[in-house]
Amino acid sequence: MRCKVSGIKIKPFMSFGKMPMANGFLKKKDFKKEFFYNLKVGFCKDHKLFQLNDYPKSPYIFNNKYPFYTSKSVFMIAHFKKYFKWVKNKFLKPKSKIIEIGSNDGTLLQNFSKHKFTHLGFEPSKNVANLSKKKGVNVITKFFSYKNSKSLKNFKSQTDLICAANAISHIPDLTDLIKGINYLLSRKGVFVFEEPYLGSMFKKVSYDQIYDAHVFIFSVHSVKKIFEDFGFDLIDAIPQKTHGGSMRYVIARANERPIKKSIKKLLKKEIRQKIHSLESCLKFKQACKISKKKFKSKIIKLKKEGKTICGYAASAKSTTVLNYCKIGNNLIDFIADSTEEKIGKYSPGTHIPVVSTEAFRKNYPDIAILCAWNHKDEILKKEKKFTKYGGKWITHVK
């Protein structure tokens, strides 16, 4: 294994075993041809970078039937409105040009569209890209790359903001990504992106952040080092509540904008907590093993007590948990979800049937596993009758 940024040889420190595609929900007739790979992770000491050892090629992940829509979450809609106001007030002029990498169904970019900003989204999945077009968002159905950036002559060196949310960790070739950013960004322009934060994952033992699409889990140390190598500064980093604990990173050309004092504080905090080291990765490995044993034992105990158990939210995250813990349809009756593309199919690897949330409400189980625990407040508010009925929520995270 080699670091995908430095090229330095590194050893995987942990394997989660044979893993299917995280969003590979399938029909019964497709069980025999299901795709699996070995989910291993490693750590580059040079770039302080947590990363997958191997990963399926992008067309397996982002295709014309990508089953994730940002607009399904009321919380994320509100978050992106605040995101827009924040970048607008801090970095934009009335005639600024904006590009979003991984624009999904246009939930973030539509805020710029409504305020008449010149904008463009890169979204490789046709189904979600088409939804954003209906919202008046300009989008091209392509992966963001240096080659594709060079076709945008009207944005060359004129883009005041390039933004992304939970998308940069999906891009294995960060060198190519940064070349594209360098080509498009104006002299005083900024690249703002949000990603699940390594420190939060270690603290909560939320190993479900690790799956095929998340090639990297970033820290302040790793982001600073990666972008410094290409003539950029990390000028700000702001913790976010999204995705179970994220960080918003702000990147600018070297010496073009002042670096916030918060960067030095966050770097010192990571050193104190040893987030920048292999030592923490090895502690995380042990914590994952303990979490796996406890969580599966808890479910087996509940099943022996005669409790009915289901999963709630057929998330990509749940694929890692269910397959790593070997929790299948012998322990869980079904997983409830509101995404049409998933209903009537089966969970990747574990083959648990996916039903509608309406079916969940018609016949409440005793226990519901909160598979999308990062949307806990939103789900509990939506399903408050389940709790009144006497149902209990459980999850694997701390």
Image (cartoon, grey):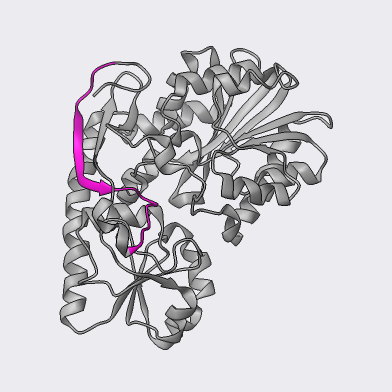
Q: Residue 341, position in %: x, y?
A: 48, 61
Q: Residue 203, position in %: x, y?
A: 33, 47
Q: Residue at x 57, y 60 (%)?
A: 72
Which quarter shows the N terminus?
top left
Task: Work out whether residue 91 can be spotted.
Answer: no
For residue 334, which quarter of the picture? bottom left
Q: Is residue 367 above or below residue 12?
A: below
In the shown orientation, is residue 179 left or right of residue 272?
Answer: right
Q: Seen from this angle, which residue lies furthest front?
A: 29
Task: Work out whether residue 65 can be spotted.
Answer: yes
Residue 14 vs residue 65, the one in the foreground:
65
Tell me where the magenta segment starts and ends, as one range.
8-27
Residue 43 on the magenta span:
no
Residue 72 vs residue 128, the one in the foreground:
128
Q: Residue 118, position in %: x, y?
A: 78, 33
Which quarter shows the C terminus?
bottom left
Q: Residue at x 22, y 49 (%)?
A: 288
In the shown orientation, is residue 351 left or right of residue 94?
Answer: left
For residue 348, which quarter of the picture? bottom left
